Amino acid sequence: MDAPDEHHIRYSTNIVDTLRWAQGHGYRTAITGEWWGPDAVALLLQRDTELIIVNVPATLHWDGESITIKP
């Protein structure tokens, strides 16, 4: 089991870094988006039947078993 880990995503964050972070925890990743707006960019993280949709900005938390979005 991996140690707990957090990853902060902001508008200025390189999204590829976030995707690599999630892939390192065993997730498949994709990006979806619109041209503008508060939810313009969303990341899709999938592992087995688990699907996480993350709007930017967000803080992701790895607890050693799965990724969750911190409030």
Image (tube, rainbow, N blue to C red):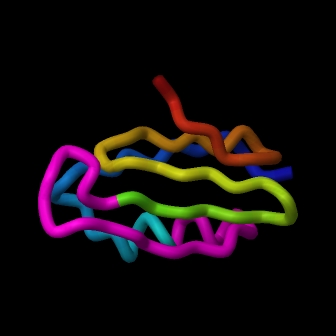
> What residue lies at 38% left-to-right and 76% top-to-bottom?
16
Tell whether 50 sits left or right of 28.
right
> Within the image, what quadrant is residue 22 found in?
bottom right
Using the image as rendered, state which of residue 64 and residue 51 is in the foreground. 51
> Within the image, what quadrant is residue 17 found in?
bottom left
Instruction: Give how far across and how far down residue 49 sits, in percent.
Output: 85, 59
Tell whether 10 sits left or right of 30.
left
Instruction: Give how far across and how far down residue 4 sits, in percent.
Output: 67, 40
Q: Is residue 13 above or below residue 8?
A: below
Tell whether 27 sits left or right of 54.
right
* Residue 59 falls inside the magenta stretch: no
> Within the image, what quadrant is residue 23 found in?
bottom right
The boundaries of the magenta stretch are 20-41
Q: Is residue 54 above or below residue 29?
A: above
Farthest residue to the top: give it: 71
> What residue lies at 15% left-to-right and 51% top-to-bottom?
37
Instruction: Give how far across and how far down residue 32 sits, in percent.
Output: 40, 70
> What residue lies at 38% left-to-right and 41% top-to-bottom?
58
* Residue 40 falls inside the magenta stretch: yes
